[in-house]
Amino acid sequence: MATPSIAMIPSGYKAEKIYSVLPTNGAGDLTFNRNSTATRVNKSGLIEQVSTDIPRLDYSDGSCPSLLLEPQIINLITKSNEVIATSNAVVTLNAAISPDGTSNAFKIKFTGTSSNSGGLLSLESNPTAGTFAASTVYTLSFYAKNLVGDGGFNARIDTDSTSTLKQEEFTATSNWQRFTMSFTTDAGSTKFGSNSRFKNFQQNGEVLFYGVQLEKNLFATSLIPTTNGILTRSADSASKTGLSSYINDSEGVLYAEISALGDDLTFRNVSLSDSSLINRLYIRYPNVSNIIQAIVEISGVYQVVITQVVSDITLNSKVAFRYKANDFSLFINGTKYIGTPLNGGSVPSGLNRLGFDYGIAGADFYGKAKDVRVYNTALTDAELTTLTTI
């Protein structure tokens, strides 16, 4: 098999840069940006905060890291490691070692009956975070660990003191786990309820909690720790221009081993382009559930569109898009899908940019990338089958 001209396999990085394995002269290193701190799971399995503009090599999926790219999100919980105790519970702050390796997990000892409450979430005290947007999906997430066997507890979000918006039961074990709960608000803006809380179904139970997060999103993203107010994590972006010597605009392959963060019906792209939005080819998750597409455009006119349904875009997929005039194929996890040429079936000239986006900006790729490569030859079916087989 031919050697790729560009290979970004997450390994080395520094501020504002992700090192590419190929080319070896550094010309393929991607420029990275994120205007805030953010967290990742490090090689030791601990949640770790990294500085502004530092790429995140995330090990949450195992021993091989992924480049983690996420959208801008606000944690609406004002104190992610604290709740307010009710009359039927005792809350102890900094009670145990948390998933970040420090002693900042809080404990709720439930002293009442199964119908009584445990700890009120720190939501309603912040005026900015105090109102839900109408008809909008939010996701609550948190880490929990049971100190008394395996026991059930309840997470609840209220719109006011009498109306429950969402309530769900969870079972914590003796190991730390992250739990999530998504819900949709009603048609009117709704005030956070003062009864939003954790409740227990195990009398005299003791549960450790860490990293409570509420975000306006369909799924949970990486933890944004808060101590005294809401906090924003800025969006990640990565791209590199000036790559004309490493991208063949007559034929080649764009390869990506990727997974989506969620099936959130937004456009998320990995592209080769001429640094414009009209001459490009790209692999993307579109705004349709569990779809992977490969597309070529010249002057904004589609030359080929290949659309394939997959079982779950949040699972790791190996995707290769082979492009050549009137000869386009998409390979996903070892299976070939043929594209029908449109409007001439040509390949755009002047390709000089690799980006986790639409071609220059917008529709950024948010997900995990284990491997991104560019080949300057149209690899054979056998080679692409081997390359993409899981």
Image (spheres, rainbow, N blue to C red):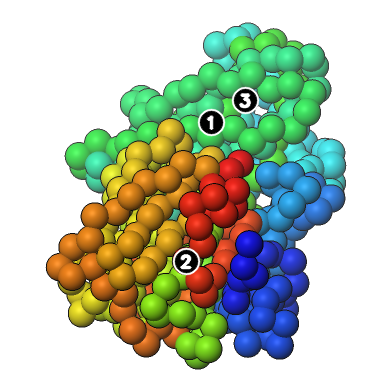
Residue beneath label 2, please? Answer: 378
Image coordinates of residue 281 in percent, x first then y, are 35, 69
Q: Viewer-proximal residue, 260 or 133?
A: 260
Can residue 269 be seen in this snapshot?
no
Q: Residue at x 69, y 22 (%)?
A: 172
**Residue flagged by tag 2: what amino acid is it?**
Ala
Question: Could you give the CA–CA distance between mark 1 and mark 3, rounded to whole angstroms?
Answer: 7 Å
Q: Viewer-proximal residue, 269 or 307?
A: 307
Give the side of residue 150 with respect to residue 29, left or right.
Answer: right
Displayed quadrant of residue 363? bottom left
Can residue 29 be seen in this snapshot?
yes
Q: Decide which of tag 1 and tag 3 comes sooner along the chain.
A: 3
Q: Secondary structure at mark 3?
A: strand
Residue beneath label 3, please? Answer: 118
Q: Quadrant of the C terminus?
A: top right
Question: Could you give the CA–CA distance between mark 1 and mark 2, rounded to whole angstroms?
Answer: 57 Å
**Residue flagged by tag 1: what amino acid is it?**
Arg
Marks 1/3 in contact by CB < 8 Å: the verdict is yes
Residue beneath label 1, please? Answer: 197
Up/down of 233 relative to 155, above or below: below
Q: Decide which of tag 1 and tag 2 comes sooner along the chain.
A: 1
Image coordinates of residue 213 in percent, x first then y, are 55, 46
Circle nearer the viewer, 2 or 3: 2
Q: Residues within 10 Å of mark 3 (few under 14, many from 20)?
A: many
Give the side of residue 281 with respect to residue 197, left or right.
Answer: left
Give the side of residue 54 with respect to residue 278, left or right.
Answer: right
Q: Quadrant of the N terminus?
A: bottom right
Image coordinates of residue 224 in percent, x first then y, are 60, 56
Q: Viewer-proximal residue, 378 or 52?
A: 378
**Residue flagged by tag 3: what amino acid is it?**
Gly
Give the side of residue 113 with respect to residue 184, left or right.
Answer: right
